[in-house]
Amino acid sequence: MSTRLAKGGRLINRTQPVEFSFNGKRFKGFQGDTLAAGLLANDQVLVGRSFKYHRPRGIVASGPEEPNALVNLGSGARLEPNQRTTTTELFDGLECTSQNHWPSLEFDVGVVNNYAARFMPAGFYYKTFIHPRPAWKHLFEPFIRRAAGLGKAPTEGDADRYEQAYAFCDVLVIGAGVAGLKAAKAAADAGNRVILLEQQPVLGGRAPVDQAEVDGKPVEAWISAMESDLAARDNVTIRTRTCGFGVYDHGYVLADERVADHTPGDGRPKHRLWRIRTGKIVTATGAIERPLSFAGNDIPGVMLASAVRDYVVNYAVSPGDRTVVVTNNDSAYQTALALKAAGLDVPAILDARDSATGALPDAARAAGIRVLTGKAIAKVKGGKRVTGVAVCAQAGEGSVQEEIACEAVAMSGGWSPVVHLWSHCGGKLTWDETISAFIPDPKRPPLNHDGSAMVEVVGSAAGDLDLTGSPKAIPPVWVMPQGAPIQLRSKMWLDYQNDVKVSDVQLASREGYVSVEHTKRYTTLGMATDQGKLSNINGLAILADSLGSEIPQVGTTTFRPPYTPVTIGALAGESRGEIFQPLRRTPMHAQHEAAGAYFEPVGLWRRPYCFPRAGETHEQAVHREVLNTRQNLGLLDASTLGKIIVKGPDAGKFLDMLYTGVMSTLPIGKCRYGLMCNEQGFLSDDGVVARIDEDTWLCHTTSGGADRIHAWMEDWLQCEWWDWKVYTANVTEQYAQVAVVGPNARKLLQVLGGMDVSKEALPFMQWADGRLAGFPVRVYRISFSGELSYEIAVPASHGAAFWEACTKAGQALGAMPYGTECLHIMRAEKGFIMIGDETDGTVIPQDLGLDWAISKKKADYLGKRGQERTYLASPDRWKLVGFDTLDGSVIPDGSYIIADGVNANGQRNVQGRVTSTYYSPTLKRGIAMGLLKHGPSRMGEIVEFNTAAGGTVKAKVRDTVFFDKDGEKQNV
């Protein structure tokens, strides 16, 4: 049985006992324990069940590579599924439960899958769940959904809080083992600002367990001196419990700091997400020990040799009275010696190598441990825990030569450098024949913007496993014994969590899955929560052998962030609840609230939908606003309109590519309406562009599209046209903008005084700078309503005061504020399109009759080639037209124009749909625009729209301009 040793335990504090529970059973541990150490100290060897076959699972590792020991941690509002016991610090009152079983961990009915394993090999679901077809919906899919996942999803909101922070440094060192500490000191000595990250609570990595001395000093003393030295420096920041989990372009690194995981409810944030920008990244992330593939290597009690060593030395936990060590390298001998030193028995060391010589094997023999070379484990005996091993020759086929009783097996198949962070940004790997592992290729590092190396790897992560510069050879042992028959290979586990066996990978290769990425998905190898940290290299080797290829030719799967799972709470930070999205308010928001505005979301903005008065419905308020604006004067807060400055010698060329029309020829002081399309040719945004000076344009976008369009611009400038001299800036929030609309618009500006806004001085589609009522303004003579209209931009700090001035000066002229719904109705009356109404990601400008806004002189623009595709150039596309209902009613939103016949699903055929539909208080009837097949050629035709109630509405096809066709009102 596993138990707590009476002496030892370098990380535990025996004067601080703690209590915790597992599946309702109360256990005791010590401060400094991990949950895994606490469970083993209480002989809780069985900790979970595997995903597919529900086989018993025990603790295998001691770090983030652990695939088995995942638990539901906490309860209620602090429940977290799939938490690794090996990285969870023990604290008083901790509650956890095991996962993936029913009705209990000890008796799980799901284990019936294990007895049917021969009928459920890799990929069986691809062949099984396709016939009969109706069974998918009613049988297979419900079953799969119930079986999916391991942990229990929380049902309550998270009680903890999370935060995010930013940091900047010259050198970021990830990993604080011996190599990492030396790298941090060297960087600090050179005068660099250094940040040192370590995922464990203490510094030193594996050195205190594996090494006696560093640079001639006792290892503990060396680490303590180095930590004191670095901590005393102003240019060094040390962060423990912090895992650097993702490396991105331009020296950008994400790290997760576990601030209060081990002290829940103390008021501190549980996690802190660090966003770090650094000049250079040094990864000292060490190496992960590989398991060996032998029959029964998944039985609880079979552990990595390094993990056994960790539990004995760090936590004074014995995995069993008798431990058999099986290995192909010298490092496992350290485990045997550590067990002996703790007073435990090591019946034998089974070394697959033909001979074992050197200091460690000699020390093991001197300690009285049997060393059997050329030997292997034929199979492990036991069910829910190890009871013994059967010994065979490594060169044979598994004939049992001897049986050894034991409670634990410590295995070591070599070491795999942690190359994940190196690979995140394109660092390439090379196969090292000496240690039988992939290591970073220093000739092909991740690159900075200037072509220099962005990441450097040191220590074990670079393949220097013993930190001497010349690691000892590790002969590969991928299957034990090497000639194992199928009966044994079908019990050799590669991926413990997903139940992937050696035989599964071999089957995949026989079935044609020669790509490692395809094999991964077919077998689910490496797709568990540990992302293949233990299984991938062994799986790649098995695949290579099956294909008759070398391992480097097979390659690796893709390494992607995060290196270890990161809670969604840390990624969200403070963005939850009411501040999940940052609400954006215009400078005039408080005045709108005081006026009783009813708000609607527009992107992240809150805009007034209407300004209802006492006793008015929203509909009545909108109708009043429309009529007043048409007859007198309306004021609209247009501050949310996107405003992007595009500046530089190549700005005109850039805008000509971005817009369907020509912007480079726009005269200074004038405006031009423009359309933007995506690469496929579909209309994505529209707006008015103003030429400010020789190399400066101001592009207006839709309110919800400003950030998206600015990002679109930057994407092209940074990724495609990087050599064009263009600068962009999103200045949407730097300016407040007021639309002054209606027959009395010019009169209001004249009352305010300060600049000439006559038709002659400021014609339609021009702009001018000046002052109104003493405010610095830029006045645009543009209209989205069909009325005489001016849009006036002022610095945001003047927005509220300017709105107040307009409101007061406009009282005698019948001024009223109006909201977005009034705006929509007035633009629909004029036949103006609205992005998001007339467009839905499948509409091109030609569908909307906007051919006039597409230059026929330009050789190219974004979307041009897409629009020339056969489907988009088809004469049968739906085109924009207007509709008058025969009875004057309003066509329901979302209605389709029905056609004769039914489709293959028995639904009515359709020939178009409504895009905008309103009651027009100006015309006192319903108006609508929509897309209709061959629409422009069907003027006067009667069509039918469906309704949710099952009826239809008849309407006559007409043009899209319902009001003031000649534009006389806006041109006065």
Image (cartoon, rainbow, N blue to C red):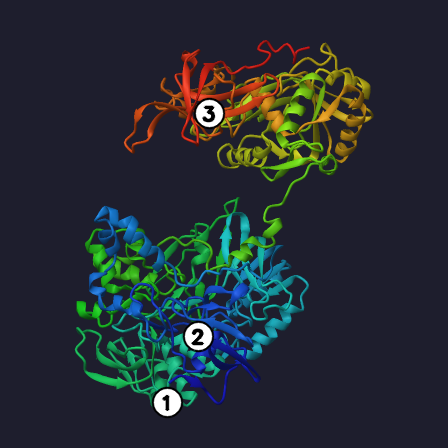
Return the mark for residue 888: none
How much space separates mark 1 and mark 3, taking CA atoms? 87 Å
Q: Nearer the viewer, mark 1 or mark 3?
A: 3
Question: Looking at this view, is 79 or 704 the one in front?
Answer: 79
Disc 3 to disc 2: CB gap under 8 Å: no
Q: Is residue 550 visible?
A: yes
Q: Quadrant of residue 785?
A: top right
Q: Earlier in the sequence, mark 3 or mark 2?
A: 2
Q: Nearer the viewer, mark 2 or mark 1?
A: 2
Mark 3 = which residue? 914
Residue 752 higher or lower than 249, as above or below: above
Disc 2 to disc 1: CB gap under 8 Å: no
Mark 1 = which residue? 367
User: Label 1 amino acid?
Assistant: Ala
Percent position (x, y) of residue 787?
Answer: 65, 16
User: Label 2 amino acid?
Assistant: Asn
Q: Secondary structure at mark 1?
A: loop
How much space separates mark 3 and mark 2, taking CA atoms? 58 Å
Percent position (x, y) of residue 553?
Answer: 28, 53
Mark 2 = which residue? 23
Q: Is residue 547 left or right of residue 939?
A: left
Q: Is residue 79 left or right of residue 464?
A: right
Q: Earlier in the sequence, mark 1 or mark 3?
A: 1
Instruction: Please tell me which residue is depicted at 59% across the width and 49% down the height of the picture.
Output: 580
Residue 838 higher or lower than 857, as above or below: below
Question: Looking at this view, is 781 or 431 the one in front?
Answer: 781
User: Label 3 amino acid?
Assistant: Val
Residue 735 higher or lower than 570, as above or below: above
